Image (tube, coloured by chain):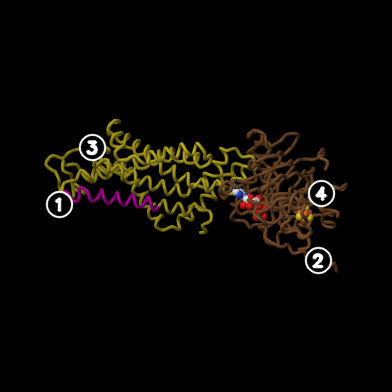
Chain colours: A yellow, B brown
Amino acid sequence: MDRKRKENVRNSFWRNTVQKFMKHRVAMFSLVFLTVEILAVVLLPLLMDLDPYTTNVGCFSMAPDDRFLLGTDDVGRDVFSRLVYGGRVSILVGFVSALLSAVIGIPLGLLAGYYGGIIRMTIMRLVDIFMSFPAMIIQLVLVTVLGASATSVMLVIGLLGWTGFARLTYSKVISVKEQEYVEAARASGATNFRQMFQYILPNSLAPLFVQFSFSVASAILQESGLSFLGLGVPVPTASWGNMIYSAQSLSTLVYRPWMWVPAGMILVATVLSINFIGDGLRDALDPKMKI
Amino acid sequence: MNDSNALLAVQNVKKYFKGTKGCYVKAVDDVSFSVTKGETLGLVGESGCGKSTLGRTVLNLVNATEGGVIYEGRDILKLPQREMRMLRKKLQMVFQNPYSSLNPRMTVLEAVRAPLDIFGIGTKEERFERSRDILRYVGLDEYQMYRYPHEFSGGQRQRIVIARAIISEPDFVVCDEPVSALDVSVRAQVLNLMQDIQKERGVAYLFISHDLSVVKHISDRIAVMYLGKIVEISPKEALYDRPGHPYTQALLSAIPIPDTDIVRERIILKGDLPSPMDPPAGCRFHTRCRFATEECRMKEPEMRFDESGHGVACHRWKE
Ligand SMILES: Nc1ncnc2c1ncn2[C@@H]1O[C@H](COP(=O)(O)OP(=O)(O)OP(=O)(O)O)[C@@H](O)[C@H]1O
Ligand code: SF4
Ligand SMILES: [Mg+2]
């Protein structure tokens, strides 16, 4: 009986949030777009005969035709297949890196904001140190040490991305912890842990969703940045990043746009739609926003 | 005053906040009083005189600068954090603003059940039933338990806050202006609810308000606070009939007496409220007191009690 009621509670909260999210047209459109995209990169390889790796001898740099939907790249691989497989990698890198950053940054920011004092000093100093590093150079060094692979790219981007989460959580927590309901929780006998995770964190989440989406988008972009320097996801594995930057030469840029324009467009579209979803979520999660 | 049957004895409590330039805001300065089981002690005073700070300090929600609060034979201000936390089951608080004292992310049921969850009281089913019963008792329907606080009016929210404060069956609840944020039309209902709760459960209240007429309605005894000090404390009737302190007299003269022809002389306080950073020497009230003498400017008056337990901190009381 009680359990059933509890589910009702959760349902009503989520129903409420979902309803509000659905009113947010741009976010809704972005969500549909991203869902379709993720379904496509996951399912297409199972449904179609896609081969991103074979170099088709004699078919280098071919313009799109009915055999190669988006043409071939300069070693004769099918661009459309690479776009789909590259999407799997890029999106995965984005989400896993952002998740890693959030899992490190949010608890640290929460501790710093809640306890203050020496804990705050230590954590925020660590944030400053991390932020003063030129991230790209550290990433290059780390990838070189770990060896270039999709896993090390995720790890490196994720490990260096926590500062944004920590800062944002910290600044939100120091205002939320002054709220009367936190003092009320303390007056009711709540432990520090309960105050942090049941009262402060849930009320600090909304901007973190936006940060998360930004972080996913940024990780996707960082992967392409690393690819540009030859330290992203290594070929022959495809990623949108290495597709764009494998077409570095001026002649490719000007005369063979099919090699990079689709990857570039889908990258931008993905990054934008993730950010819009973050915006929509922020508004939907705000309990004071009426539908 | 006889402390032996006191539920809670506050002894020489001080709370100074660090202000600017090394100054201290003496929000609460050497306050002592006690509360007996099941009574309501009203605490009145102007805005900024330290009422909320006193309430918070008594419950050890802010660290006292000095002093002690004796409850069940122990000074709770000196308890380790863990033991203090366990005592909070018995010492609860109702806050002034029902709009900000409920977690917006918790349903009413979760909010009210929180003290039971925190102290692990009862089984899951029992907690649910107790929460439902107490919400019914304060006047909410069962279907409303799954809603979030923003869906309720101020009066309803304060009922929820009250339910949360009494669900763990406390002995003592600090009520910090529980009705002043509410519409006048619902104030009486909430006050009556609080009185009913007291009658049925024997809980003692420290009832803070800046409104003497509200305090008069609900209190057994009343303490009057001025600039961080209690200047008069007394059973309600004595305080209203024979106010001893010039400050109390001034406060009382400002409320109209209904249904009588008595025209009370309206005492206008001269001057502004001095800053709690730099309270006047001697009697803190001397800058605004019409009876002030040289002694008042030099020497701080001690609280003196008569046989009836009426205490006044004034050199010229009963002159
Ligand atoms: N956290 C704090 N830091 C510094 N000064 C404080 C703090 N809290 C309260 N004060 C000061 O202590 C004094 C007493 O404040 P308090 O809130 O206890 O007054 P109050 O009697 O409850 O007033 P009100 O009727 O407005 O609620 C005020 O001068 C206030 O500025
Ligand atoms: S001690 Fe003196 S100044 Fe203070 S209230 Fe009494 S008469 Fe007035
Ligand atoms: Mg106050």
Amino acid under label 1? Tyr
Disc 2 residue crowd, few under 14, some 14–19, many 20+, Cα 10 Å: few
Q: Give the residues in magenta.
A: A252-276
Residue behind mark 2: B265
Q: Are discs 2 and 1 both within one chain?
A: no
Q: Mark 2 or mark 4, which is nearer the start of the sequence? A: 2
Q: Which mark is residue A255?
A: 1
SS label for mark 4: strand
Distance CA(mark 2)–CA(mark 3): 94 Å
Q: Are discs 2 and 3 both within one chain?
A: no
User: Residue B169, located in which quarter of the rendered image?
Assistant: top right
Residue behind mark 4: B311
Distance CA(mark 1)–CA(mark 4): 97 Å
Q: Is residue A51 visible?
A: no
Q: Are discs 4 and 3 both within one chain?
A: no
For discs 1 and 4, the disc positioned in front in the rendered view: 4
Q: Is residue B83 above or below residue B236?
A: above
Placement of the N terminus of chain B among the 4 image quadrants: top right
Amino acid under label 3? Val
Distance CA(mark 4)–CA(mark 3): 88 Å
